[in-house]
Amino acid sequence: MTIFCCVNCGQSLTSEVVPGEPLRGSERPATHEAVSPRMDAGTFKVNFDASLLILHPDDVPGTTPHPDPRRLSGCCGVAGQDGPNLVCSGCGVEVATKESDCWTDNFVALIAAATDAPASE
Ligand SMILES: [Zn+2]
Ligand SMILES: [Zn+2]
């Protein structure tokens, strides 16, 4: 079990998570709905260059939406195309990007450099 913490203030950002694999291709709903989450709850996946940790959207209880509303643009959710849109709820630094819109993927990408995550897996 791992809990990733904010490198700036030490607050825990995630739930207890274990390494996992992304879930494969769910059909995109025809309506304005988010696809099912990319990761199972309680799992994370380090991305190809170890700069991001991909998590289930419910596994980041230590984060809060970015105070700049332009970062939170989206149709049905947040698109995550305008830079990090989640900040540490303890100190306010940018720590993650959430994608949950009807035309994007559905996950939270934690910035590895903003956490105490090991540099590589
Ligand atoms: Zn929509
Ligand atoms: Zn912090």
Image (tube, rainbow, N blue to C red):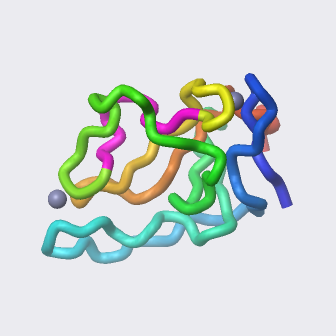
Q: Is residue 12 above or below residue 49?
A: below
Residue 17 forms part of the magenta stretch:
no
Which quadrant, please, contains the N terminus?
bottom right
| Horizontal arrangement in the rendering, residue 84 relative to residue 121 (left or right) | left
Which quadrant, please, contains the C terminus?
top right
Task: Provide residue 20's location: percent of width, then percent of height.
Answer: 68, 65
Residue at 25% x, 71% y: name it. Answer: 28
Who is closer to the viewer here, 73 or 56?
A: 73
Residue at 51% x, 50% y: name it. Answer: 108
Residue 79 forms part of the magenta stretch:
yes
Task: Provide residue 43's location: percent of width, then percent of height.
Answer: 67, 64
| Horizontal arrangement in the rendering, residue 31 relative to residue 110 (left or right) | left
Tell me which image quadrant ligand 1 sits in.
bottom left
Residue at 27% x, 29% y: name it. Answer: 70
Q: Is residue 20 above or below residue 62?
A: below
The quarter of the picture where residue 5 lies is top right
Magenta-drawn segment: 78-87
Who is closer to the viewer here, 46 or 32?
A: 32
Prevailing secondary structure class for the magenta stretch in the rendered image? loop
Residue at 77% x, 38% y: name it. Answer: 11
The quarter of the picture where residue 85 lies is top left
Is residue 49 something one can see in this rendering? Answer: no
| Horizontal arrangement in the rendering, residue 21 relative to residue 98 (left or right) | right
Q: Is residue 3 above or below residue 58?
A: above
